[in-house]
Image (spheres, rainbow, N blue to C red):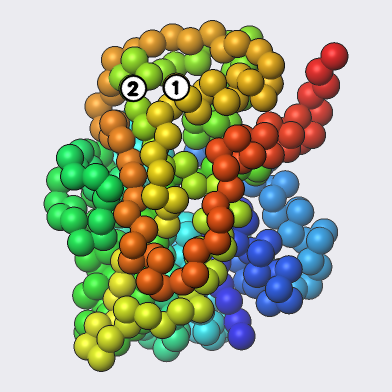
Amino acid sequence: MKILITGVAGFIGFSLAKYLLKKNNIVYGIDNLNKYYDVNLKKKRLTYLRVNFGKKFIFNKIDISNKKKIDKYFKKKKFHKVFHLAAQAGVRYSLKHPEKYLESNLIGFSNIIFNCKKQNVKNFFYASSSSVYGDNKTLPFKESDKVSSPLQYYAATKISNEVMAESYSRLYKLKSTGLRFFTVYGPWGRPDMALFSFVKNIFKNKSINLFNNGFHSRDFTYIEDAIYLVVKISESKKFFEKDNYHRIINVGTGYSIPLKKYLKLIENKIKKKAKIKYLKRQKGDMVKTYACIKKLSKIIKLKRRTSIKTGISNFVEWYKLFYNIRIN
């Protein structure tokens, strides 16, 4: 089976590739290696895959917004399963650079799903986001909730992806699954995410910005748990019905952790107090995210989730090793 992962140099794409390669799959990966965050980190993820899995991992540097190159790539490779994880990430970044999201999240998405249909890909999985729920007051967030009031352009592009996939699935019977990820964290994570930036600033004796005066809460999902869920979802045919070839599934834990508690656990692990700067809520920020996992539990057998304490500990140990930090 030929498996393609777009955005393979990204946090989730890399982690999924590593999991599938360990199971002796042949994995093809593409990425444009953009400069949204440290390109060196992305390159080291790719190096890890090449060194540990050799010829089972095949990488090409391709921008998904380049239709000509994507068309040629799909026609040549003939994939059976596609995990589309490439996107312009970052909620706050979308407020200042909306054009980046148009290129990657809309044009790029269109290029990928078009080729999945054209080349008869059997299963298409794509990354959506908990941000589509906006300022929803009903908790936990259910897949059936209305998602027509996004707080940022990033969320708007993710809603658009879901609508496009729904359309393609109805028109062409393309089996598609939208994965609404909830704040994925862990080793090899993104520098722009809370855990990475908090740990980095504590080690460097820099202050940490807590927006909304710290009164945020998130459904933090450990990376290995998220990948386990994605793989098991990809192996399940539940919720694909006779005339319904599209499904949306929350990828979360069903627990929401206050950001202040999250930071406290980081401080306890590092054994150092953070310098905190309390700021007002920023435009586009969601106050709380909390996944309903009833649908998820009907599709797959859920395993015991990784505790927040363990997840944070694993990240800190990885961070110290990766950046060669020694604590006396």
Q: Looking at the image, which residue is at 79% across and 66% down?
A: 53
CA distance for labels 2 and 1: 7 Å
Q: Residues within 10 Å of mark 2 (few under 14, many from 20)?
A: some
Q: Position of residue 153 (x, y in %)?
A: 26, 43
Q: Secondary structure at mark 1?
A: helix
Residue bearing the label numbered 2: 215
User: Relative to 64, is 177 above or below?
Assistant: below
Quadrant occupied by the N terminus: bottom right
Q: Looking at the image, which residue is at 74% across and 34% down?
A: 317
Question: 182 or 169: which is nearer to us?
Answer: 182
Question: 136 or 16: which is nearer to us?
Answer: 136
Under mark 1, the amino acid is Lys
Locate residue 96: give its quadrant. Answer: top left
108 left or right of 70?
left
Marks 2 and 1 close (CB-CB < 8 Å): yes
Residue bearing the label numbered 1: 260
Q: Looking at the image, which residue is at 42% across and 34% down?
A: 257
Sequence order check, earlier mark of 2 and 1: 2
Q: Position of residue 205 (x, y in %)?
A: 63, 10
